[in-house]
Image: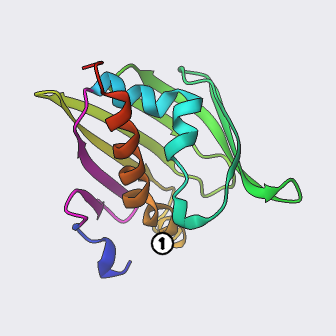
Amino acid sequence: MGDRQENVPVNGRTVVKRISEREIAATRIFDAPARIVFEAWTDPELFARWWVPKSLGVPLRSCEMDVRTGGTYRLEFGKDAENSWAFFGKYIDVVPPTRIVWTNDEGENGAISTVTFVEQDGKTLLTFSEVYPSKQALDESLGGMDGAPEQFEQLDELLATLGAGRA
């Protein structure tokens, strides 16, 4: 893993850190209550507005999410049906508004992803981590966290609109 993702705050707010040889995590404090950050993560319409980094230049074609323990998700990206790919899996633990754990079932090296929402004084510390089945699997998928700082910037912008009058 390159030095660019070792404990480096991006825009002073997002930190991406390799926790162990199999785990990587991104953290950021959002200026919104946990229930609103959780809603932005679990409502398919809201999620679709911030999840894909704009710099990727690839639209999210569909977003199906049944965010409950035992529920499933499927995100399809691409410019058209012939040039698309999907991420999918199931939610294995959902505790509103504090925690979501899900699988990434696209291949045998899929991570278990966890996002936690810890509220303090009206702000939320969000931690998004991925645990891979091996060091090699994590090393091969580091690009997945490259987009986290941009995604979190986009989430921050969305939260600013959602938080108005709802805190």
Quadrant for the C terminus in the image: top left
Q: Residue at x 42, y 50 (%)?
A: 154
Quadrant for the N terminus in the image: bottom left
Residue ranking furthest to the right: 82
Regarding residue 18, the answer to whether it shows in the image is: no
- Whether residue 164 is situated above or below residue 73 in the rendered picture: above
Regarding residue 130, the answer to whether it shows in the image is: yes
Q: Residue at x 69, y 55 (%)?
A: 107
Q: How many marks?
A: 1
Question: Residue 49, image x and y in percent?
Answer: 54, 42
Q: Residue at x 54, y 20 (%)?
A: 68
Residue in front for this viewpoint, 14 or 49:
49
Answer whether residue 20 is magenta in the image. Answer: yes
Question: Residue 126, image x and y in percent?
Answer: 29, 41
Residue in front for this viewpoint, 156 or 93:
156
Q: Which residue is mark 1?
A: 139
- Whether residue 5 is situated above or below residue 90 in the rendered picture: below
Residue ranking furthest to the left: 121
Q: Secondary structure at mark 1?
A: helix
Residue in front for this viewpoint, 29 or 130:
29
Answer whether residue 126 is magenta in the image. Answer: no
In the shown orientation, is residue 150 left or right of residue 67?
left
Question: Residue 96, image x and y in percent?
Answer: 38, 19
Residue in front for this viewpoint, 12 or 130:
12
Give the image quarter of residue 32.
Answer: top left
Q: Residue at x 43, y 51 (%)?
A: 130
Residue type highlighted by circle 1: Asp
Question: Residue 114, image x and y in percent?
Answer: 41, 40
Give the image quarter of residue 10.
Answer: bottom left
- Whether residue 149 is situated above or below residue 102 in the rendered picture: below
- Whether residue 116 is situated above or below residue 35 in the rendered picture: below
Residues shaded magenta: 10-33
